[in-house]
Image: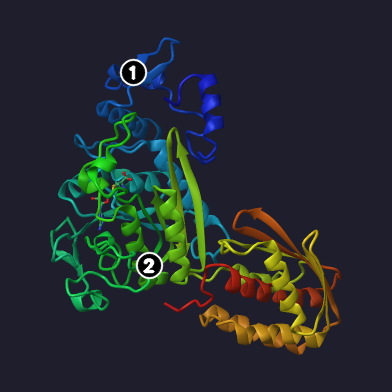
Amino acid sequence: MPWNSNSNRKRKRKERPKIHPKNKYSDCPPDFALLASLYPSFQPFVFYSRNGRPAIDWTDFNATRELTRVLLLHDHGLNWWIPDGQLCPTVPNRSNYIHWIDDLLSSDIFPKTNTKGENVRGFDIGTGANCIYPLLGASLLGWSFVGSDMTDVALEWAERNVKDNPQISELIEIRRVKSGDDNLSVEDPHDGKSSYCESKEDLTQNADTEGKPLSSSFDLPADVDKRYHGSPILLGVVRDDEKFDFCMCNPPFFETIEEAGLNPKTSCGGTPEEMVCPGGEKAFITHIIEDSSILKHTFRWYTTMVGRKVNLKFLISKLWEVGVTIVKTTEFVQGQTCRWGLAWSFVPPARKISSLHVAEKNNLSFMLEGLQRQFSAIHILESIGSFFSTSGASCNLNASPFTVDITASHDHYKAIIKNEENHCDRAVSGEDVQDTSIISSCLNVPIKNLCFKISVFQQTPGTLLVRGSLKQADSQVSGAFSLILQRLEESLKHKFCRKKTTVNPS
Ligand SMILES: C[S@@+](CC[C@H](N)C(=O)[O-])C[C@H]1O[C@@H](n2cnc3c(N)ncnc32)[C@H](O)[C@@H]1O
């Protein structure tokens, strides 16, 4: 198994390039011999293989649980335990997800609302008895959390794991999601009283006769049983007045417990309640997407783990259908296990506005991700040509090396901007109102001829980079150039990517 001798470490690190660089274990995997010498309770689980390397039996639940306990204690100062059979998390693996969320929050994709690390508030969907994400997020980064779950054992042990760590206990609230028919309320396990209850009417506005949510865009093809019909996930659990920076989720991945018990090489426990839900992760995450399309700006980022790549593709197409503004994915690899991280948001990206202020730039680029399969670089290039030529600008298209040279007068420029305003079903959020007023003032200032080149580069299948290079150095002209590039980006995404251009205000 991983994390043993130096040579093995090097080999494994090469094989597992996806461990996050900020992960405590990326350069320094756990040292079993050291841990065994420091923690006598761990010692019985460590043996030395023929080549003298310390190892543990990964098929022994007690061994993996004890390893998690000592790692949380030794490296994070956390007291932790779970009862027999509950899902046992691997600490390096779970830390990767936390660091990825930290990257999302620190990126400049959206306008900042939090100073890094301050008052970041997360929601862990299905925190489990192990409560691993709130414990790691609070101890590594000082984040506060609501951790939801619905089984008695998960709630009882998550509470215990929080209380046993007084240094961070104030940061974590464990919230009960009621299961069963009367599942439309949540309880605070501290006092057992219902702390929130959305009216059944509100929650079943789009419901069938059995109270199961109905949504045209979410119906899983011709298989009613595969639609999620369990307890509420976000809607009905999150309170009206709450805002979060992110939510995260390690969902019940499987449709049956037989499917769940498929990895004979490890024993990480996991009860049917933890591992299984009707329709599996596809149905569970589809329901999160459905909730997010109603809750919208309640969360800056919605995130989840996805266990199967085929589901990832399906879920990404659902996201574009509901009008998200951005989708991000990553891969979490550890040993033999590979999972994906999926993140989305309804917040308008900051770049749209900031590029107006960063008007001095002569080279601007954007990505076209999630291209529909039938389109390639040549289609994009031709579309770029017609985007400019319909406004009267002169275009010289070169199919090798995929460039278009454009010369546009002030009138052409005005036509490009106005045409696209009419064509695109543009957003009406506050930011876009501001955007529109800046555009009007830009259009009224006469500019010289604009000369620029647009180049198209293939990145990966389904992803292209479009770069615009202005041939003049003039701040007034580069402001107009920036606007043109925005319009081009909107137009191409609208035409070629599976994404709606409309951003509905929440
Ligand atoms: C795979 S476990 C994840 C546990 C923990 N977060 C981890 O990563 O090890 C999934 C958890 O989701 C919980 N769960 C299932 N449906 C839920 C719902 N509607 N709301 C909240 N939790 C739910 C299960 O009880 C279980 O604890």
Residue 169: x and y in percent read 29, 48
Q: CA distance from mark 2 to mark 1?
A: 45 Å
Q: From what the image shows, is residue 458 above or below residue 336?
A: below
Q: Quadrant of residue 336?
A: top left
Q: From what the image shows, is residue 350 above or below residue 336?
A: below
Relative placement, left or right, of 414 versus 323 is right
Q: Where, quadrant-wise, is the C terminus in this rendering?
A: bottom left
Q: Where, quadrant-wise, is the N terminus in this rendering?
A: top left
Residue 202: x and y in percent read 24, 77
- In the rendered picture of this protein, how many numbered marks are placed on residues? 2
Three-letter amino acid code at the position of disc 2: Ser
For this rendering, which residue is in front, 9 or 500? Answer: 500
Q: Quadrant of residue 455?
A: bottom right
Three-letter amino acid code at the position of disc 1: Val
Residue 77: x and y in percent read 36, 35
> Which label lies toward us, 2 or 1?
2
Q: Name the residue beneath numbered marker 2.
A: 292
Q: Residues within 10 Å of mark 1 (few under 14, many from 20)?
A: some
Q: From what the image shows, is residue 23 above or below residue 184?
A: above
**Mark 1 Cβ and ligand 1 under 8 Å apart:** no
Give the mark nearer the N terminus: 2 vs 1.
1
Q: From what the image shows, is residue 150 above or below residue 475?
A: above
Residue 291 - label = none
Which residue corresponds to the image point at 51% horizontal and 73% vertical from the top-left? 500
Q: Name the residue beneath numbered marker 1.
A: 46
Residue 61: x and y in percent read 26, 29
Note whether residue 212 is visible.
yes
